[in-house]
Image (cartoon, rainbow, N blue to C red):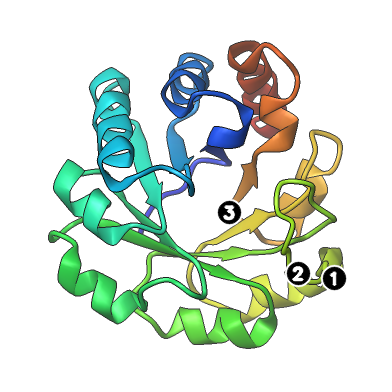
Amino acid sequence: MIQLPRLYAVADATFGHPVEVAKALFAGGARLVQLRHKSASDRALLEEVESILQLAPVGTHLFVNDRSDIARMSVAAGVHLGQTDLPPALARRVLAPGQLIGRSTHSLTEALEADGEPVDYIAVGPVFATSTKTDAAPVLGLERLREICSRVRKPVVAIGGITLESALDVLRCGAASVAVIADLLRKGDIENRTRVWIRHLES
């Protein structure tokens, strides 16, 4: 079972060049980064992943959003799958032994289903209203998050509208980690903001 860091940082291409964003996140102390660049061509995405892996510090992990094939070819740590992506059982057949799978879920039903699938962690959200997805599922809130965390066995990554001010309340619901995009990437100095986040989560 994966030991998730409390901060699950997302290098979202809508906030800048993903390689530079990932570089700043790692420089700030992030130990796990997911690359999310939905509009990239296959070739561009593979090149971005390979570039990030070359600069990633020893002991850090990179997940590729959606694309099991790119994760396999680049030898990234793993892939993060949405509900409309390749099912985890099929993704396992694409990935190399030891590569990991995360699964997005938006309800207790989906989380329980993911708990029985060959995935290593379950992302649950949106916990709060989010501005980084135009087609986001209905907000869950802390009580539903707490229920989901109590019902599944696998580590939960909470995602969606989480800020520095709300992060500890989210972790108290039983989440192993918080995935953060906007509150990390919109503040200008991504490297310093990452340090602030890590200090706060480890306090």
Quadrant (top left, top right, bottom left, bottom right) of the C terminus? top right
Is 48 located above or below residue 167 in the figure? above
Q: Which mark is residue 176?
A: 3
Kindly report the distance in space between the C-alpha atoms of the residues bearing marks 2 and 1.
5 Å
- Closer to us: 8 or 152: 8
Residue positioned 13% across, 59% down in the render: 96
- Closer to us: 199 or 81: 81
Estimate how packed mark 3 is, as few (under 14), some (14 to 19) or many (20 or more) residues with alpha carbons within 10 Å: many
Q: Which mark is residue 8?
A: none
Left or right placement of residue 115 versus residue 201 in this view: left
Kindly report the distance in space between the C-alpha atoms of the residues bearing marks 1 and 3.
16 Å
As shown in the figure, which amino acid type bears the numbered disc 3?
Ala
Estimate how packed mark 2 is, as few (under 14), some (14 to 19) or many (20 or more) residues with alpha carbons within 10 Å: some
Residue 62: image x %, image y %?
35, 39
Nearest to N terminus: mark 2 or mark 3? 2
Left or right placement of residue 58 versus residue 163 in this view: left
| Secondary structure beneath label 1 | helix
Find out whether the residues at labels 2 and 1 contact each other: C-beta distance under 8 Å: yes
Residue 129: image x %, image y %?
85, 55
Can the viewer see residue 142 in this picture? yes
Quadrant (top left, top right, bottom left, bottom right) of the N terminus? bottom left
Estimate how packed mark 1 is, as few (under 14), some (14 to 19) or many (20 or more) residues with alpha carbons within 10 Å: few
Residue positioned 47% across, 42% down in the render: 37
To which quarter of the image does residue 76 belong? top left
As shown in the figure, which amino acid type bears the numbered disc 2?
Arg
Is 100 located above or below residue 12 in the figure? below
Residue 87: image x %, image y %?
36, 78
Nearest to N terminus: mark 1 or mark 3? 1
Residue holding disc 2 = 146
Kindly report the distance in space between the C-alpha atoms of the residues bearing marks 2 and 3.
12 Å
